[in-house]
Amino acid sequence: MKDFDGKVALVTGTTGIGFATARRLAAGGAAIIACGIDRSANAAMEAELEGSGAKALVIGADVSVPDQVRDAVAAGVAKFGGIDIIVNSAAVHPYGTAVSTDFETWNRAMSVNVGSIYLTAHFGIPEMVRRGGGAIVNVASVQGFACQQNVAAYATTKGAIHTLTRALALDHARSGIRVNSVSPGSIRTPILEKAARGENGTDADVESAYKRFGEAHPIGRIGEPEEVAELIAFLCSSKAGFCTGADYKIDGGLTAGIGVK
């Protein structure tokens, strides 16, 4: 028997960690409801999951919009019968200080990175309660603990995710719902690729940039989405049955020391 046979997982974000997590949960037997705004990424995920024989429903949705999240949850429940797992991976990563970041950009970061977690909980938790409980994992970041310069909005959202995770865990523990977060360091994702290319999207030597980013981590490299997906899968599984309200760093030792190389 696979570890997620009979389970239904809602995953937000169809690239990077979201894609890797959907793949891992599907390989474990879960039916996947995936939501993303990137049409090409949605199509790629749908093709791969269906090609592997997985049960999947990939929905084009902006997870910061209440009606779209409500409809995605309803469509997934109608197709698969309920929701047991929610993984919130969708994110935007604007650059800027509090002075240089305009209000629209600030609000967009809050709405996508934090608001989407509220929305999947708001519409998804009642469905999880009907199934007798479940697990939620929110993708935060080491930037919620110690941030770089020029990422005021992004770092703020990641700190907020840590707090919202604890609040959800406390509020819904008696319903059999466990809520945790993971805080990755530098992971090979489209967001990191954008950082590697620079804010203007220039044709930088991405692999050289990844190597430079990796050198900041004591383990000496950047992480892979599949490594984060394995941690998320563990937290979603019955093996993590006593884990709730916590954050789990997966950062190659980045936050373990001060200026360690």
Image: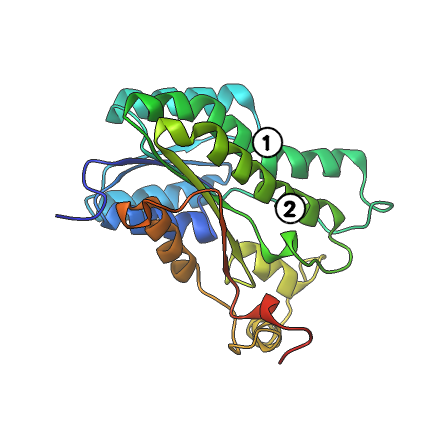
Please state, as top left, top right, bottom left or bottom right, where the C terminus lies in the image: bottom right
Of residues 48 and 167, the one nearer the viewer is: 167
Q: Residue furthest left?
A: 1
| Residue 27 seen in the figure | yes
Q: Position of residue 121 (x, y in %)?
A: 47, 28
Q: Position of residue 184 (x, y in %)?
A: 52, 58
Q: Is residue 81 above or below residue 91?
A: above
Q: Position of residue 70 (x, y in %)?
A: 46, 20
Decide if residue 65 is on the left or right side of residue 143. Answer: left
- Label 2 neighbourhood size at 10 Å, few (<14), some (14-19), many (20+)? some
Which residue corresponds to mark 1? 115
User: How much space separates mark 1 and mark 2, taking CA atoms?
Assistant: 13 Å
State the image quarter where residue 256 is shown.
bottom right
- Label 1 neighbourhood size at 10 Å, few (<14), some (14-19), many (20+)? many
Decide if residue 56 is on the left or right side of residue 44. Answer: left
Of residues 164 and 79, the one nearer the viewer is: 164
Which residue corresponds to mark 2? 159
What type is the residue that disc 2 sits on? Gly
Tag 2 or tag 1, which sits nearer the N-term? 1
Q: Is residue 215 above or below residue 4?
A: below
Element type at marker 1? helix
